[in-house]
Image (cartoon, rainbow, N blue to C red):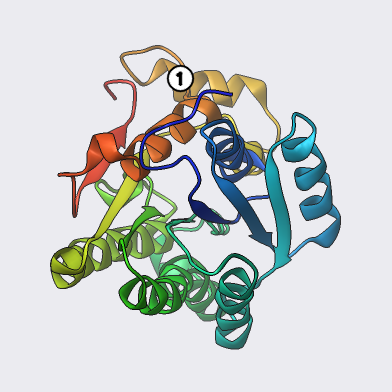
Amino acid sequence: MATVDGVDGKVALVVGGTAGIGLSTAEAFVRAGAMVVVAGRSAAAGEAAVGLLTRSGGSARYLPADVQDPDSVSRMVSTVVAEYGRLDIAFNNAGWDGPATPTADIDEADWLGMVNTKLSGVWRCMKYELRQMTRQDGGGAVVNMAGNWGLVGFPGYSSYCAAAHGIMGLTKAAAKEYARQGIRINSVCPGAVRSPMLDRMVGGDEGLVEVFGDGVAAGRVATPEEVANAVLWLSSAAASYVNGAGLVLDGGG
């Protein structure tokens, strides 16, 4: 375990932390010396994640949370504070890929579901995280998952792109609102990442994963660990002057 300045001894919440990028980020926080809370809807996945995170002696626990439910999000943050006394770092990573559909054919329920989960879910988390961070000494660091579709468009996923662009706007506005209170707010914008979400989007077709990779200069998709390292850096003292940014991780795509 190698501690990281600004992360060691801190309380870190990873929303959507039971698998994929979220779990890899939780692992990175544990290795850096943080006390980690992973939140998600599946208790079974959450307990499995905690088992993995604590196997090497790290500090971790699971909390149930549904980012579509304001009361659930409020309870999540309140429980973290009740147990640890504060909240120093938050990675808002919960999301939904949604069906691949041309814009004119998107079902109303699917559009609203995407906005409610990906964009409004991040806002709900920030609402309660920021209220706590403004009450405590030392401020905090928030990192939101936007994805690089928050910077560019992709055919068939206009609702996802719209929500992701919204996260970038939310990040930039909130970063200016809370900077003087010692709170930094940034987003990560990875391209295709080898993760459960990508597997769902390509239907488990490894050939399509290779197509995604061939489309970027690096010639491959990112690993969850590479995104986790970026989140860790944005949360650390090394990124103390980085605020309102969308950190692109697309292999030169």
For the N terminus, give its image quadrant: top right
Residue drawn at the location 56% of the way across and 82% of the way down: 74
**241 or 33, which is in the foreground?**
33
Q: Amino acid at mark 1?
A: Gly
> Residue at horizontal 67%, vertical 28%?
205
Q: Is residue 206 left or right of residue 162?
A: right
- Locate residue 106, reporting x and y percent: 48, 69
Farthest bottom residue? 71
Residue ID at (41%, 64%): 159
Q: Report the label total.
A: 1
Quadrant position of residue 249:
top left
Q: Is residue 95 above or below residue 177?
A: above
| Residue 202 visible | no
In depth, the one of 9 and 210 nearer the eye is 9
Question: Would you say residue 34 is visible in this rendering?
Answer: yes
Q: Position of residue 215 (x, y in %)?
A: 37, 21
Which residue is disc 1 drawn over? 213
Q: Is residue 105 above or below residue 235?
A: below
Q: Position of residue 41 (x, y in %)?
A: 72, 65
Displayed quadrant of residue 102: bottom left
Density class for disc 1 (Cα within 10 Å; few <14, some 14-19, many ≥20) is many
Helix, strand or loop at label 1? It is helix
Up/down of 221 relative to 116, above or below? above
Residue 150 on image: x %, y %: 30, 52
Q: Horizontal placement of 69 versus 167: left or right?
A: right
Query: In terms of depth relative to the viewer, which is nearer, 157 or 36?
Result: 36
**Going 50% across and 45% down the picture, which residue do you hit?**
9
Tell me the quarter of the image containing the C terminus: top left
